[in-house]
Amino acid sequence: MPAEHQPVLEALGVSKQFAGVKALDEVTFSLRAGEVHALVGENGAGKSTLIKVLTGVYQPDAGALRYRGAPAVFHRPTQAQQAGISTIYQEVNLVPLMSVAANVFLGREPRNRLGLVDTARLTAMATELLADYGIDEDVRRPLGELAVGAQQMVALARAVSTDAQVVIMDEPTSSLEPREVQTLFGVIDTLQRKGIAIVYVSHRMDELYLTCDRVTVLRDGRLVHTGPLAELPRIELVSMMLGREVGDIRAHGATGFAAEHGRNFAGHEREPLLRAENLVSGRRLAGVSVDVRPGEVVGLAGLLGSGRSETVRAILGDLPLDGGTITVAGNVVPSGSVPAAMRAGISMLAEDRKADGIIPNLSVRENIVLAALPRLSRFGLVSRARQDRIVRTFMDRLRIKAAGPDQKVGELSGGNQQKVLLARWLCAQPKLLLLDEPTRGIDVGAKAEVQALIDELAAEGLAVLLVSSDMEELIDGADRLVVLRDGVAVGELAGDQVTEDNVLAAIASVDEGSR
Amino acid sequence: MTSSTKSRESTVDVTAPPRRSTASRQLFATVLQRQGAAIVLVLMVAVAWLSFPNFGTVDNLRDLLLQSSFLAIIALGMTFVIITGGIDLSVGSVYALGGVLAAYGSQWGLVGALLLPLVACGLIGLVNGVLVARTGMAPFIVTLATLLFARGLLLAISHEGATTYKIAPDAAFLVLGRGTLLGVGYPVYIAAALFVVGGVVLRRTAFGNSVFATGGAENSALLMGLPVVRTKITVYTLSGALAGFAGALTAAYLESGVTVIGVGTELDAISVVVIGGTLLTGGAGSILGTVVGVLLRDVIQNIINQVGSLDSNYQAVVSGGFLLAVVVVQRSLAGNRVRRGRPRLREHS
Amino acid sequence: MAGVTVATRLTVDRARVAAWSQDYGVYAAVGVLLVFNVAFTANFLSVANFRTQLVEAAPVCIVALGMALVIGTEGVDLSVGAVMALSAALVPLYLGYDTMTAVVVALAAGLACGLFNGFLVAYLGIQPIVATLALLVGGRGLALVIAHGQLVQLYNPTFLSLGTGDLLGIPISVLVAAVLAVAAGLLVQRTTFGRRIVAIGGNRAASRLAGLPVRRVLVGVYAICGVLAGVAGVLATARLSASDPANVGLLMELSAITAVVVGGTPLTGGRIRVLGTVMGALLMQLVRATLIKHNLPDSTAQMVQAAIIVAAVYAARERSSR
């Protein structure tokens, strides 16, 4: 193998398991010197776990690492760093209150003859270094005062200045302005010429095809594909990421939705219950519009970062809006206020049930009634009787498996926790139900039950907006699909058009002139 | 939005950053927070100079500086602790303990008078540091308990407060507290020297950078491989040792180990550090700010004394008021900074 | 194979023991101390002694109840001692009218302080330690200014009876503490407000997304804590038959927080054990009494107490991260 194709960092047959879930299953990954290697995959694919194994945050359960031709073991991230593997994360892991220069050289400050930090040299070195990264700010300013993109650049400069041989970039452009993205590409060019290898983790197709030489696709913890990127058509890349074969149609419905659900929706002439028009929020939403009629299930499709979760959060009032209006049943709902949205009849099942959903130390009962407390109390006193009735009803209807309504929710399985949360939102008697990944991380049986429930609710007249990364779920469950990309709706599919091929094509949609 | 990244040669639209309109307001707020105390100090001094003929006299100023120096030394240690995001509520008791130990140890000469308080109080600080850094217990609880412990220890050594150890009138140790140079007491010079050293350590050493990083973003500091645990243990040990040393100096000044001092001194120390511009939430601060805070406090005390009819307890009220104002300003600044940051991205694999 | 199962069972048991000790350790500790004292302390088993212990424990218990609510929201209130001093300072000024007025004013001052703290935390988003520091620093000074730095002897018999008198054979302060404890328990278990406190402490983001009025609830808990500190201040002053703002409530925040934490209410919030808090207050009192009754000098008593506090808080800290 020619010298420039020698692998500089390799993971060989690496496996990693957490609490019975295989995050990585015998993954082999090989990074060559001087290449830019894209690492792609959806949620739960194992990208972040692989990176953590490569950088010493985790130790693999099986398999081995090789670095610069020799076996390598990293027990701590600092070991990997010192060996020359640097990472820049999505979140800028620097110290915002300290100066830019200090951040760049933290832990490796230049000293003068007295052994003290040589501030003059520190400032000069930092200024010189950062000029290559397009930063001409005063390096003595606190890092936090810079735009986030500039902060990312400083993180990159720091990572590279530690004589790194490998730089791992995790979603590096997610907060960059277009001008900063150009600078980043220029920096990547320079690094490549120096022979530094780069792992580029991103979901932005355009950027990947512009900068990366090879690509590795992970799905469900396994290696799906690795090879040169230029020859791979986008639609193939997308389908590998999502696990769908182009042109492959599932023979039998494996979801809990009634088959052909999408084609049976008869309420097309009804007035939309929800009218979200032109929602704009920072850089996450660039003008999303979506309607939902009573009894209709509208799905939001798209890749990671396309703005699906942000859309539903904005509708609930959890995301401040810079522009756009939300109307429910003809009345404008003030944005940015969760109580206002709930009063208008909107409820949302959040994406992250651990962080935003369950209150683990409280009982099933308490979690269910949380959003409806005022209704179930008398003069501020909790009415046990009323609560019991409601809780029983929901536990039965949703088949929540628990030792009893008083069991702590934290002890339940993921599927049952999700059902408890669903019960909570249904208890609030919503007109519009927003579901963000309702069946993520729950067992197959519970998945089917939840999906069947969504069907029932829609049949009863509830308007549902469904966000899901599960293609099958979206296809089977939705009457209509809105495809999002980079914060804008790029397509809408209804009725017979709701097929996997069409969705994939819409997601991978490209303008003329680029592949 | 991403279409502009499609081709590298395409011209990119560079929009002016929206924050330009609030930049001047931000600047004003930052100046207010950083130099606010200094401005108020200058104003107070001016007011006092003009209003009270006694204020500007050399005697009064000398006295003011001398009285400030003891609290200043304690506040120096507290500055380091607060910058790491912690707090040390035990310094008042440790200060008093240092005084008693110095007086007791003076029977063995200068060495005994200094070594005993430094070692003992440093040890107490070490215990604080280890408990905070290793067990993750909240600093305010740990140091509240140490406050109690140190006071108990002080009582034990002084026979339940009955004994006030006196320092022999010819002891060399007394010079540290009572000696003067150019009419200004030695403690002032000692405090000044300590502050200079402290300032250099904080701003010009790797340790100082560690202190800021630990308080500013502990997770990032850990990821960067900085010795966070060691840093925390060191600052608490330093705080204890400095408080003990201040106590020793006070004993030298008072010529005895007074047992009833130091009650509430920790709050004074915290106040002057925060008023001087150090963030209670950690990650930012300055030694100079603490100096200003100490001087401001003592100028106000002096003014209150000059007025004569004002209750000296107003000191604490004014401190509390300033503290409140500073904390609110600090919070609004932090809020602005956070708002300009990016929205929290969820962890995706 | 058997070795593996034994090992797993051992680790499971250790976790369960840890959880049990956090929840119920305080009862065990109180029990141990009671037994110890009955065996080794002269005159412990007398009615007079029980009365004394309960009366001494009452103020800590009352403050700890308010503190438990605040800690339940993952907050803390360091100003409770200063608030006690403020109420103590105000009492003599209004005793001239009548006892009722004086008490009402003292409680109103506590309420005002609590609302102030709550506003800082809930609406300005200031960290609770930082927010309550202002009153901690300035509150006692304010109290001393109001009282002109003086300790004032009080002679009003109605007022003094609050501290020394009985109602239905029970000392009034103990009765007040008991009533408040029951009320707190009912509040936490049975009212919408109480359940909201626990939910907010358990997962603030989830509570917000469920439409709970988070800020209003936060202001409410700090307000209650302030009022209860006021009550404790009044009772302590009545018992002392003097208004002593310089010393009343000194280090009360330490005692109250410790009582709450050893009673099984975690500092991370989300669970409030009212009965545990009461037991915690009793435990603190018993520790102090045991040390004193065995003629341990103040110095040793304080050092032992400090060590016990550290050990207790260390033992009671949440093991699993959230």
Image (spheres, coloured by chain):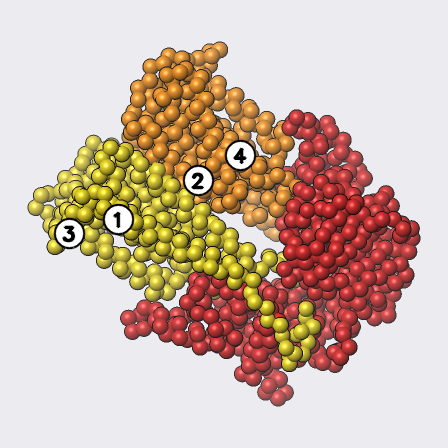
Q: Can you say whether C55 is above or below A354 in the image? A: above
Q: Is residue C247 left or right of residue A214?
A: left
The kind of secondary structure element at disc 1 is helix
Chain coloured red in the rendered structure = A
Quadrant in the rendering for residue A140: bottom left
Three-letter code, disc 4: Val
Q: Amino acid at mark 1?
A: Val
- Eyeballing the image, is C219 above or below A252? above
Residue at label 4? C221
- Asked if the residue under mark 2 is in contact with the one under mark 4, i.e. CB atoms within 8 Å, the reply is no
Q: Secondary structure at mark 3?
A: strand
- Residue at numbered disc 1: B45
The type of residue carrying mark 2 is: Thr
Q: CA distance from mark 3 to mark 1?
A: 19 Å
C159 or C312: nearer the viewer:
C159
Instruction: In the rendered structure, find residue B184 and report the number of the disc placed on it.
Output: 3
Is A195 or A299 nearer to us in this picture? A299
- In the image: residue B312, left or right of residue B170: right
Q: Residue at x 30, y 22 (%)?
A: C152
Alpha-carbon span between mark 2 and mark 3: 38 Å
x then y, percent, for residue B195? 27, 56
Q: Which chain is orange?
A: C
Q: Residues within 10 Å of mark 3 (few under 14, many from 20)?
A: some
The residue that mark 2 highlights is C132
Q: Nearer the viewer, mark 4 or mark 1?
A: 1
Q: Earlier in the sequence, mark 4 or mark 2?
A: 2
| Three-letter amino acid code at the position of disc 3 | Val
